[in-house]
Amino acid sequence: VVVGPIAELEERCGVTGVTDLHRDSIDHFTMKSADGKRTLRRVEEVFDCWFESGSMPYAQAHYPFEGEEATRKFEETFPADFIAEGLDQTRGWFYTLMVLSTALFDKPAFKNVVVNGLVLAQDGKKMSKRLKNYPDPNKVVETHGADALRLYLINSPVVRAEPLKFKEEDVKGVVRDVMLPWFNAFRFFVQNARVMELETGNAVVLDPAAAVPENSNPMDAWITSRLGSLVEYVKVEIAEYRLYTVVPRLVEFIEELTNWYVRLNRGRLKGQSSDADRAAALTCLGEVLVALSIVMAPCAPFFAEYAYQALKSLLPESIREDSVHYLMLPTAKAGSVNVEFEAAVDRMQEVINLGRIARERQNVPLKQPLRDIIVTHRDESVLAALRALEPYVSAELNVREVRYEPDEARYVVLRAAANHKALGRRLKGDMGKVAAAIKAMSPADIAAMSDAGRVELEGHVLEADDVVVSRDVREDLHEQGKYEVASSGGTSGILVLLNLEQDSALVAEGVCREVINRVQKLRKKAGLNPEDRIEVFLHTPDASLAATLASSASSLGAALGLPGVADAVHLPASAPIVADAAAEPVAGAPLRVVIVRATAAAVDGDAAGLAECVRACADVAAVARGEDVRMVWEGKEVVLRAGVEVFESVYEMLQAQKGRA
């Protein structure tokens, strides 16, 4: 007999007031059998406790006892779209759900199952309150942030139903590699958008629905395409419940945004090209950051909300929401996704990374300019795509010229050798003759093997991994320069040859880059903002470095956004110094860097009070336009002639004095 409601139990057992159905409260109940000849007692066996959990889909709807409407609603929502639980539920909840739904409806109770692995202590043991073998979760959140902890967990083996040995230092790594770069890109945008508005009076306006501008900057088109590809990818993967593939792609996009887009467009975003180009770059970056905050909201909800709240005032009012979590995933802009161009940029990044590897092998810093780099690839279309992106390659690798060549045989010699570790045991006695045959392979044979992925020699089929292929620079090429080789993708991939030979002009340019680095470090240490107007003065007792600074004053100034850079020994005592420090030596020589707040300067600026009076009264822009300065000094009205007695900066004044001398 299977008893249903409590009322039935009371009626059949002749009891009343039953409130507790646990064994110790009902085991003494008895009832008569249907024929009245036997006394029935509760059977000893009990259902596994997971039976009631497996009944959840029906129990929560009290199916089928709530009428036709409730039954219809249940049938519309069954099976569930997905369930989510730990791997340990394979024989518990997952199993009982499947058994009951199969018995009742001959189908599963769920369409998808999201399974997470177990989070273990760092030593691989189960986390234990008694052993205290795990860090305090509250302290982890307080130290690194809830977003970092969340990203660490959902970008770990746990989301692939595998165990995770929890390491707090890896949470810190998420802060360093994901959260900080994302925040820095956000802050960089906000700072430069503010500067643009101050300088031009025009605020950045974001409209994610607007079409991609024609003839847009290549990097704007690329990051917009990458964003579109990302959004479509996330939608597809989430719809298929492949959550473990989503976060790695999001993290990769943040790396592309910060290490490639922002890095390659820093000058544009700072307004070093034109106002229109700066506005286009900032608009592109702003729209990407808004979309990124929406896509990242489920993974890093707190910073995503912070970023969206800071950026939504730049959006059309009609599409603003009170919270980023009220928004659906964005859609790619019409016509924005260009997979072929994305592949071209991938190739460009590959060349840049190979060039960096070549520099690192010979300990040549990126700040040191080099004469040229040769890029080789068999496919002319690949080289054509790289030519279109050449300015980025030359700028990132700091080379004067990029040369392209489809025939790598002009520059390198392919050689093959046996992988003795892979082949030794397998070939045994034939190893000697096979190794000789491999060594005798011609460049054409090696290329054919690389394309096919295998080769047959001396009766043995060898995989590509069984053969070690090297690319050595041709001896006659060394007569043209000192080349370092780096390659990827085997013989069918890209090969670069970086000319490391330097002349005096290249060395001087490298020194200037080091000097600029020292200035920027001092500027940061002084707490200056990007919009702060400054002047820079340098001094060194080293004759060689001093000569380089003097000959490069204009180019140093241009790189720093200044009219020029002068020797600090000529700096008037009244100059408003912001920072004055001995910088890290450049080319082994000491260097003094002085940063001065940019203001109008008078020829007699050392006179008591005159410098302060000029700085307070003179309009720098007016002086730059050639307008004289009228002011009262020591009770008298004074007129200082622009370009003669008053100048728009200390540097301009020193240059004028130098010219008159």
Image (cartoon, helix red, strand yellow):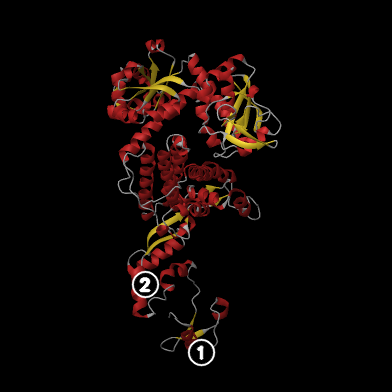
Q: Is residue 385 left or right of residue 301?
A: left
- Residue 636: image quadrant is top right
Q: Quadrant of the C terminus?
A: top right
Structural crowding at the residue carrying mark 2, measured as other residues with C-alpha within 10 Å and reported as few (<14), some (14–19) or many (≥20): some
- Residue 450: image quadrant is top left
Mark 2: amino acid: Phe
Q: Is residue 418 left or right of residue 45?
A: left
Which one is in front, 541 or 167?
Answer: 541
Where's residue 624, x and y in %?
52, 33
Mark 1: amino acid: Gly
Where's residue 55, x and y in %?
43, 70
The disc at residue 14 is 1
Q: Residue at x 35, y 20 (%)?
A: 430
Which one is in front, 194 or 116?
Answer: 194
Above/below status of 41 relative to 414: below
N-term-proximal mark, 1 vs 2 = 1
- Residue 594: image quadrant is top right
